[in-house]
Amino acid sequence: MKRFWAQAGRITLRDLLIEGRAGEGLAIILPFGVLALLVIPLATDASATLLSNLAAPIFWLITLVFGIQIAFRQSAAETATQRRMLTMLGLDPVARFVGRSLSSGIILLIFLLVLFPIMLALFQPEVEVGLLRVLPDTLLYVSGLAMLGTLIGDISSGLRNRTALAPLLSAPLAIPLVMGASQAMLGSGQEDGILTWTILLGLSNLLIAVVSVLTARTLEEAAL
Amino acid sequence: MIRKFLSIFSNPRNLIPIIATVAVVSGLVAALLSPPDLRMGNLVKIMYPHVASAWLAFVAFIVTGVGSAGWLISRRMHFDHTAVASAEIGVMFTAIAVLTGMIWGQPIWGTPWHWGDARLTSTAVMFFVYVGYLALRRATTDPYIRARRSSVLGIIAVVQVPIVYFSVTLWRTLHQGFTVRPDGINLSGSMVFTLFFNVAAFSLLYIALSSARTRLAAREAEVYQEEGQTAGSVVTAPSLEAGR
């Protein structure tokens, strides 16, 4: 078990190191996400009421679209040769999945933390956001999207049309995550509970994790 | 000519498609002749192909999920062929279910698409999940690698089926609840017969289409095996026997 986590940790560190050097997620995709937040008000004639009502759904939609981009960033894609080498070194496919999901999750969390105050400033949402109450749902959203992105990335690895195909595969499957996170944010400042949405996010995470762990070896073979 | 025509019926492989076609046409005629509803009038007639298409889509996607799991467990290509055949049929009938639902929704709700209808929205999402499944299959040429990749997606995607089916109870929705319930059926006698006849006819059509597509998928795999040889594999040592 200790070896498993050591392997997962090394994969995470390697991915973060590559991200630090390439800066694809935080130096390219993040500014693009901020730009999208600026473009939407211009496209809607900067109607303050409309923007204030749509703030939470737009925020989660942008995190979904750009989160998928983060998960499928080119700098995180491994070639068949690299994967073969890691397999020959005895890397557990599940540890690889966990490591890659963790690194994507960390980058996605930073993305969200930067985007959230910008959204608050630009859209001034009407609803009160209970930050502490919405935190577990946000973490579940991030982990779910990171795991889904890693899984779909593995399914589509090595394909020539991967960049076009992967978003089509992951966006419909990520809908429960977006719904859960968005509704939890909308309900976090109110008296009503957000437990239903937390359960939805938790179940989605569980399902993705179970499928990913059970099929990690099969997908590893497909990528070699 | 007549003998040639009759020979079609003598082949057992042709019997199911012929029976299915006759059954579907009869079902649609029965739908047109069925009595109007008290509130919806003749608009209720669209319910028969709509419900039957939705039912067929559910069955097809469940079979895709089972086929995908079967491939992952046994690695037998037959499971993969069954999965793809069912997925293609499922996508086609999901599109028909959504379209007939929209046509039905226009006069009943006053709009073809209502976001308050969880069933319609979740069905559309399910449609795109399986469009992605088929796109993934098209992206890979090697049948074995294709089966590996798509079987994983086939298992994740099947989760959509219970979500769509129970969407009428999980969310507040405009869509009517379950017509067939443990405590009885919410329809009159002739309408029940027409509905079940259409469901049975569409099920027969599914069997006919999926068996034909499964055979085609197996043939495609054979052609790949024959044509997909490595460069130089056709060059063999000269045979001394050939010249004699």
Image (cartoon, grey):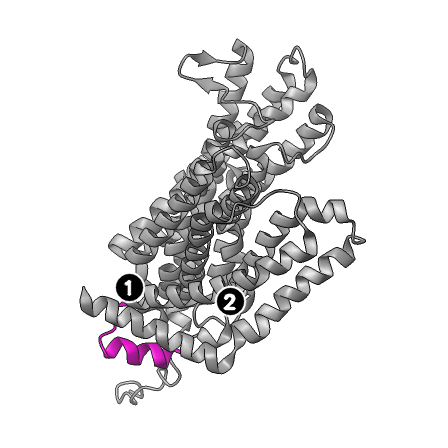
Q: Nearer the viewer, residue B1 or B172?
A: B172
Magenta span: chief secondary structure: helix
- Residue name at image x 30 percent, y 85 percent: B242
Q: Secondary structure at mark 1?
A: helix
Indicate whether B203 appears above or below A41: above
Q: Nearer the viewer, residue B186 or A86?
A: A86
Q: Residues within 10 Å of mark 1 (few under 14, many from 20)?
A: some
Q: x, y percentage for residue A177?
A: 48, 48
Asked if one can make out residue B33 in the rendered structure from this viewpoint, the answer is yes
- Residue name at image x 50 percent, y 71 percent: A73
Q: Nearer the viewer, residue B43 or B24?
A: B43
* Residue A32: quadrant of the picture: bottom right
Q: Which residue is mark 2?
A: A70
Kind of residue at disc 1 = Val
Kind of residue at disc 2 = Ile
* Residue B219: quadrant of the picture: bottom left
Q: Quadrant of the C terminus of chain A?
A: bottom left
Asked if one can make out residue A78 in the rendered structure from this viewpoint, the answer is no
- Residue name at image x 69 percent, y 53 percent: A123
Q: How many marks?
A: 2
Q: x, y percentage for residue A6?
A: 24, 71
Q: Secondary structure at mark 2?
A: helix
The mark found on residue A94 in the picture is: 1
Highlighted magenta segment, given as a residue range: A79-93
Would residue A114 be found to the left or right of residue B220 on screen?
A: right
> How far apart are labels 2 and 1 at the CA level?
20 Å
